[in-house]
Image (cartoon, rainbow, N blue to C red):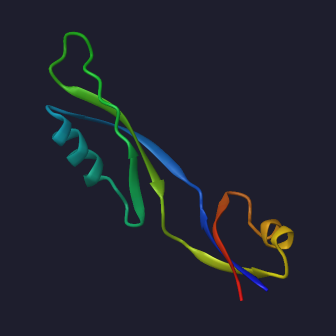
Amino acid sequence: MLIGRIRPVETRTFEVQGESLAALRAAVDAQLPAGWMVVDVPAAMPKGSQLLTSTATIARRDGVEQIEAEDQAALEAKVPEGWQLLSVHRV
């Protein structure tokens, strides 16, 4: 018997701006839902502006569930669309 841990694969993007890199990160953190983590905050300064802007990307990291199957192929077949297999162990 194999046991696998799975979680949803979901990302979101949103625009933030600030006067510094720290301000950009604080703006992202202020919008970060529980169970999510920051993936990317690329900074840019548009010409003629004194503010940094970013299209921040966050990813969901909660919602971990357990699935069971007799073999690896059956386990992989049980992973729903929009989810990823995190780990597998034999019991």
Answer with left or right where residue 47 lies relative to residue 1.
Answer: left
Quadrant showing the N terminus: bottom right
Q: Residue at x 29, y 29 (%)?
A: 43
Answer with left or right where residue 89 lies relative to residue 25.
Answer: right
Q: Which residue lies furthest to the front in this view?
A: 90
Answer with left or right where residue 75 lies relative to residue 67.
Answer: right
User: From what the image shows, is residue 77 above or below residue 37?
Assistant: below
Quadrant showing the C terminus: bottom right
User: From what the image shows, is residue 7 above or below residue 4?
Assistant: above
Answer with left or right where residue 72 lies relative to residue 58.
Answer: right
Residue 5 percent location from the top left of the image: 63, 74
Residue 71 percent location from the top left of the image: 84, 76
User: From what the image shows, is residue 66 above or below residue 80?
Assistant: below
Q: Residue at x 79, y 70 (%)?
A: 78
Q: Residue furthest bottom?
A: 91
User: From what the image shows, is residue 37 above or below residue 16?
Assistant: below
Q: Residue at x 85, y 82 (%)?
A: 70
Residue 53 percent location from the top left of the image: 28, 28
Residue 3 percent location from the top left of the image: 70, 81
Q: Which residue is drawn at 37% across and 66% down?
A: 34
